[in-house]
Amino acid sequence: MTAPQDGPAAPARPGRVGVRRLAALLPLGALALLGLLFLGHALWRDPNVQPRALVGKPVPAVSLPEMDSGRPEPVAGGTGPYLINFFASWCAPCEIEQPTLLALKAEGVTIVGVAYKDAPVSAQGFLTRLGDPFARRLIDRDGRAGLEFGVTGVPETYLVGSDGRILDKHSGPLDADSARALLAGAR
């Protein structure tokens, strides 16, 4: 019987090292591909595109609690044209648009205010501090109505025609020019 020889180890099988390297590099390759996909999406998407899926459709049949009484009321309602404005006490752009909404109220425009993801006390404090332009004030505490309307952020304002259909939508704070442009859709 011969004794085992101590000597250099047998060389590794050539295919084994390549598979291990490939297994280590595969997650990095997948991550790089995902990065390229996100970069491509960011470069070719238009950030100014606002979803307008409800334009031309009836106002969603959603009821929300009235701010003072808590009694459920339909968001839709009133004789058109009128505006539905989603706002929040925590929203800085909502403060910016408040003078425009007050001016619209002074001109006789009916505005339904929906406090989006806000507490009634906070929303009431906001309106007490900055003025209340709303004919009706509703609370969408959990954002359910916002989902039905397709709200992407506050403030958002919808123009509703006399037939109860949404005629136009404005995302962001209203100023005098954008308010005129929005109301022009009612004529």
Image: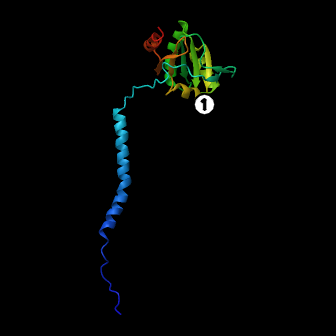
Residue 142: quarter of image: top right
Q: Which is more toward the observer, 51 or 126?
A: 51
Percent coordinates x, y for residue 37 in the rendering: 36, 41
Task: Identify the residue at the far bottom of this view.
Answer: 1
Percent coordinates x, y for residue 36 in the rendering: 34, 42
- The amino acid pointed to by label 1 is Asp
Percent coordinates x, y for residue 31 in the rendering: 38, 48
**Circle 1 residue:** 142
Residue at 54% across / 9% down in the picture? 109
SS of the residue under disc 1: loop
Percent coordinates x, y for residue 68 in the rendering: 67, 19
Q: Which is more toward the observer, 120 or 80?
A: 80
Residue 78: tell me if it is visible: yes
Image position of 119 (left or right of 179):
right
Residue 141: quarter of image: top right
Task: Identify the residue at the far top of this view.
Answer: 107
* Dot 1 alpha-carbon crowd within 10 angstroms: few under 14, some 14 to 19, many 20 or more: few
